[in-house]
Image (tube, coloured by chain):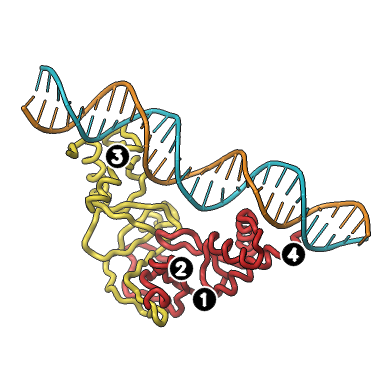
Chain colours: A red, B yellow, C orange, D cyan
Amino acid sequence: MQRDTKQRGTILKVLKIADRPLSIEEILVTTRKIIPGIGIATVYRAIKSYLQNKKITKVNLPGCQQRYEVTSLEHNHHFWCRMCDKVFKVPGCSGKLNFNSPEGFQTELHEITLKGLCSECSL
Amino acid sequence: MQRDTKQRGTILKVLKIADRPLSIEEILVTTRKIIPGIGIATVYRAIKSYLQNKKITKVNLPGCQQRYEVTSLEHNHHFWCRMCDKVFKVPGCSGKLNFNSPEGFQTELHEITLKGLCSECSL
DNA sequence: ATATTATTGATAACGTATTATCAAAAACAA
DNA sequence: TTGTTTTTGATAATACGTTATCAATAATAT
């Protein structure tokens, strides 16, 4: 059976507190502030396990490396800051776009990525 | 100086005729119908060269491998078919979205990816 | 507390996309 | 046509993200 460990628990906590999608590297660095010796293999194992039980979700952005966020019910989009390379959630998509798919195409979902400067980097 | 070769010329022609973003593999396979012996290194070299002189542009889609398309002036988005894995251009974005960036964020551009079934795979 | 078994950390191995190497072939200038 | 130099194709090398291996450690049941 799956045992409760400090490592796995902390990794999920880190993702919850961040409240934005994190890369493996960000998860590793942030978790090391709490558990300095944690290894990268443990991060990958925890992520794999949390993906399987749907507690976290993969976030793919065009041209950026894979991120992971705590699974949420809402349909969110994302903002990527070109300066600090952080990704943020963007709430409030109505689900409708102001243009249509090409003739004969069936659109099942859409993903929107905003790119620019985050509030920190805009200063 | 840069010499004109059958290989490079054909690769650009393949991209123009396709009229949609192609992956390295798609470029290789399609070009081989015209030049059977062409090697993958040549495709990579041609792509690099055409990227440098801006004749083609990288197309990044979330969770998909890199594609390349002939550079165009218009602001296009893309449709990815989950069945055949082909990517298509989607014309007609007004440039405005029906939701805003978070407070303090400066959005410089947006990218929209539609996912579903293309016209062929919908049949 | 002890025995059992899952988990961890270090790192080797792997997969895949891309680039480097180099002799043979092709493009160009004269 | 000939000589020079770029390009090509085959493949070795590289980069990098992820997974496998394994002894030591930690979590759980008794």
Which chain is home to disc 3? B
Q: Is residue A118 left or right of residue A5?
A: left
Quadrant that contains the N terminus of chain A: bottom right
Residue at x-position 46% and y-position 72% = A88
Residue A74 image label? 1
- Measured Cα–Cα span from mark 4 to mark 3: 54 Å
In the image, residue C16 lies at what x, y percent? 47, 44
The residue tagged 4 is A4
Quarter of image, res B1: top left
In the image, residue B62 lies at what x, y percent? 43, 60
> What is the secondary structure assignment of the residue under circle 1?
loop
- Measured Cα–Cα span from mark 2 to mark 1: 21 Å
Q: Are marks 4 and 3 in contact (CB under 8 Å)?
A: no
Which chain is home to disc 4? A
The residue tagged 2 is A86
- Measured Cα–Cα span from mark 4 to mark 2: 30 Å
Q: Which of labels 4 and 3 is toward the front?
A: 4
Q: Is residue B60 left or right of residue A32?
A: left
What amino acid does circle 3 point to?
Answer: Thr
First in sequence, mark 4 or 2: give its number: 4
In front: A106, or B12? B12
In the image, residue B3 lies at what x, y percent? 18, 37
Residue at x-position 43% and y-position 60% = A64
Q: Are marks 1 and 4 on the same chain?
A: yes
